[in-house]
Amino acid sequence: ELTDHLGYEKGDPAGRELPNARNGSSPKTVASEAGPVELNIPRDRDGTFTPRLVPKGSRRLGGLDDIIISLYAGGMTLRDIQHHLTSTIGTDLSHETISKICDEVLDAVDEEKLSRPVDRGVSGDLRSG
């Protein structure tokens, strides 16, 4: 990603002539479905690089959200999900974080339901769809 952003490969002498350059990396730990993952996020001197694979401010990878939603949809409580994630993959998320993930999905589902057209059927009766 940084190579695309800067326009040259790491170690390429042509990059020395460009105004923006690589500027090391910053360590970051993200929670994933395989447990905590240590990353080194590259930086540029101008501070204009924004990673797309693991965006700035992100503390979880997408697959973990899917697991949480699946467990919640299966009837587990938020505390049960928290315990399950800690005991199975070593990811320690707070009760509030898990609740926020579930709330975001529930809000999206409610929005989808409200945006669907009403099916009046053949007889004109309202039917929930």
Image: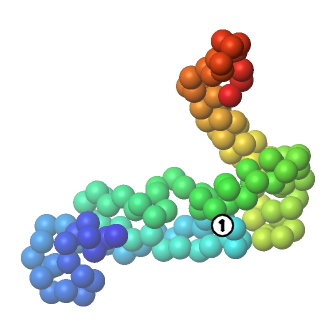
- Residue 38 x/y as whole percent: 59, 74
Q: Is residue 126 left or right of residue 77?
A: left
For this view, does 41 lie left or right of residue 112?
left
Q: Mark 1 highlights which residue?
A: 32
The quarter of the image holding the N terminus is bottom left
Asked whether, in this view, residue 61 is left or right of residue 103, the answer is left
Residue drawn at 73 percent across, 59 percent down: 67
Q: Nearer the viewer, residue 107 or 60?
A: 107
Above or below for 14 versus 108: below
Tell me residue 108's x, y (percent).
61, 35
User: Outermost residue toward the top?
Assistant: 124
User: Which quadrant holds the C terminus?
Assistant: top right
Is residue 100 visible to us here?
no
Decide if residue 59 is on the left or right side of residue 74.
Answer: left
Scheme of image coloration: rainbow
**As shown in the figure, which amino acid type bears the numbered disc 1?**
Ser
